[in-house]
Amino acid sequence: MIYFDNASTTKTIPKISKNIGLWMEEFFGNPNSIHSDGQKSRRVIENVRMYISSLLNVESEEIIFTSCATESNNTIIRGLYESYPEKNEVIVSPIEHKSVINPIRYLSKKGVKVHFLKVNNEGIVDIDDLKRKISNKTLFVSVIHVNNETGVIQDIEGIGKICKDYNIPFFSDTVQSFCKINIPIEYVDFLSVSGHKINAPKGIGFLRRNSNLKISPLLYGGGQEFGIRSGTENPVSILALSESIKFWDKEGESLINKLTELSNKFIYGLLEIIPEVKIINKDSKRIPNIVNVIFPKIKGHTMVMALNSEGIEVSSGSACSSGSPSPSDVLLAYGLSEEEALRSVRFSFGIFNTEDEVEICLEKIKTVYSRLKSLTDFF
Ligand code: PLP
């Protein structure tokens, strides 16, 4: 199979997968035990914490290991809500990931007023709208750095500066941007990262919290991770995460160049085959590995299934529960009609993909598209 669904998850770097068994034997001790094996595991965790904090240029106690970005996002959102009950408004972009939108919906049920920021038809947040909505009642502002469906990059430095002027916490989901583009950390109080998006295994992530601000924990227990995330830490996954970050840090420029070449080859090849396709954010600031395509006439789900049967794995932007797909809220926020949004297919490239795979994929799209198009013409 040719795997072009890297925004969903990535393959673990082989060197890391191979080492995991060995690390499990070596770092089996509970990092909270004071004996030698426990302290061996503790040292692994604290070294990684120091490494990540120095990379981000923050204090080491500001890095909290979690199981995934969903947990980080919930901890930040619900943790702020519980810590500052006097603030009863939040400001959020309409193109956040569900792991941000749904905890914010939970706050709304608790009586918090939610203001959605306007975005233009390129999905870019309207900064003037933020200036109109922000006030001393604002609990926090949340704007995703890079959207997972379209790859569009937000000006989080500009947004963070406004939050700083008003002394309001700024949170950005940096799951799709971390290791790929610079994060202007001096303006971002809270951020979330997930290992499996950057070639580490699933089940490990972290959050950064500005230690001048309070967040209460989701989980109460042994008080690990500075009391913000109780539960025995996983030294092996934390080590695996750090190895993947080191890999991206060392190879970053060439990896990004490779991803840019792959996506350009794909985009221009696709436009030659089907000139009527619409590519979301084609000419705006976008990370190179995510390309969201609206095919004429054919539903995204149908295209995904047809490509899968030809050996190409991609995803559609629409969520499918109870058998009938619903359009992506993110694409609706761009101003697309429901019918158009249902035709979206996301191709997301990764560091193990090759130009040959792009060529094969284009050939398969050509075949599948002409087959499906003739069927839709017929009906
Ligand atoms: N935020 C963004 C932007 C994502 O793309 C994802 C995963 O798809 C998440 C959060 C959730 O990450 P995790 O799978 O680690 O919970």
Image (cartoon, helix red, strand yellow):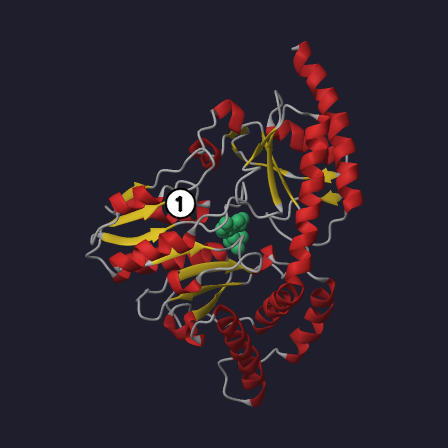
In the rendered image, the vertical position of residue 363 relative to residue 228, given as above or below? above
Task: For the N terminus, give its image quadrant.
Answer: top right
In the rendered image, the vertical position of residue 237 relative to residue 289, given as above or below? below
Task: For the C terminus, give its image quadrant.
Answer: top right
Quarter of image, res 304:
top right
Q: Is residue 367 left or right of residue 64?
A: right
Q: Is residue 136 left or right of residue 343?
A: left
In the rendered image, the vertical position of residue 47 relative to residue 192, given as above or below? below
Q: In this view, does 311 lie to the left or right of 113?
A: right
Mark 1 surroundings: few (<14), some (14-19) or many (≥20) residues within 10 A: some
User: 203 or 207, which lies in front?
Assistant: 207
Q: Mark 1 points at which residue?
A: 101
Is residue 165 visible to us here?
A: yes
Q: Which residue is drawn at 76% across and 48% down?
A: 354
Q: Which residue is drawn at 64% across and 69% down?
A: 243
User: 128 or 49, which lies in front?
Assistant: 128
Residue 99 percent coordinates (x, y) = 44, 49
Residue 212 percent coordinates (x, y) = 31, 70
Q: In this view, does 189 lie to the left or right of 237?
A: left
In the rendered image, the vertical position of residue 334 relative to residue 31, given as above or below? above
User: 340 or 271, which lies in front?
Assistant: 271
Quarter of image, res 270:
top right
User: 59 or 161, which lies in front?
Assistant: 161
Secondary structure type for disc 1: helix
Residue 52 percent coordinates (x, y) = 52, 71
Is residue 168 visible to us here?
A: no
